[in-house]
Amino acid sequence: MIGSSPGMVEIYKTLAQVAPTEANVLIEGETGTGKELIARMIHRHSRRSDKPFVPVDCGSIPPSLLESELFGALKGAFTGADRDRVGVHTRHKSRARSGLGQSDASPLPCSSRGKKRQQFRHS
């Protein structure tokens, strides 16, 4: 990343503070503002940098499947759920604590956003 504006300097300071910690970081912003780039920088400078970074473009997943894709679903939870499914958040969280970046969460229904934030807080 490049930039020396006061806003960018604050971003760099925040990255330096959170990257070496085990803290969960929620990055929000409009499409095209560099959320995934920030997430990759945090990952690159974290203790998990030798583990995979897994970006998830929430905008490319149909809204009706998004919640089960992120958080998982039990068999029979909805039409077509023929087996238990582990969500990408849980799957990658359990694999050597890799980094997971979810971009373009704006298509999430309000209930899924709340669930995402709740799971984020408790992971």
Image (cartoon, rainbow, N blue to C red):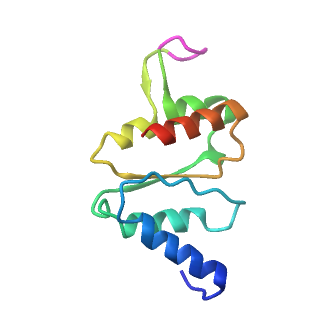
Residue at 32%, 48% (x, y): give it: 97
Q: Is residue 115 above or below residue 30?
A: above
Image point (44%, 25%), residue name: 85
Residue 9 visible from this viewpoint = yes
Between residues 57 and 50, which one lies in front from this camera angle? 50
Q: Is residue 32 above or below residue 102?
A: below
Instruction: Say how many tags the image has.
Output: 0
Point out the residue furthest to the bottom here: 4
**Is the C terminus in the top left, top right, bottom left or bottom right quadrant?**
top left
Q: Identify the image quadrant of residue 34.
A: bottom right
Q: 59 or 26, which lies in front?
A: 26
| Principal secondary structure, stretch drawn in magenta | loop
The residue at 44%/69% (across/down) is 17
Residue 24 % position (x, y): 45, 51
Residue at left offset 54%, top offset 28%: 68
Q: Would you say residue 88 is visible in this rendering?
A: no
Q: In the rendered image, which quarter is residue 11 located in?
A: bottom right
Expressed as whole percent of the image width and height from the top left, the position of residue 120 reads 50, 42
Q: Nearer the viewer, residue 76 or 26?
A: 26
Q: Which residue lies most toward the top here?
A: 76
On whether residue 112 falls in the magenta region, the answer is no
Depth check: 45 or 73 in front? 45
Measured as percent of width and height from the top left, residue 81 is found at: 52, 17
Please give the range of residues in magenta.
75-81
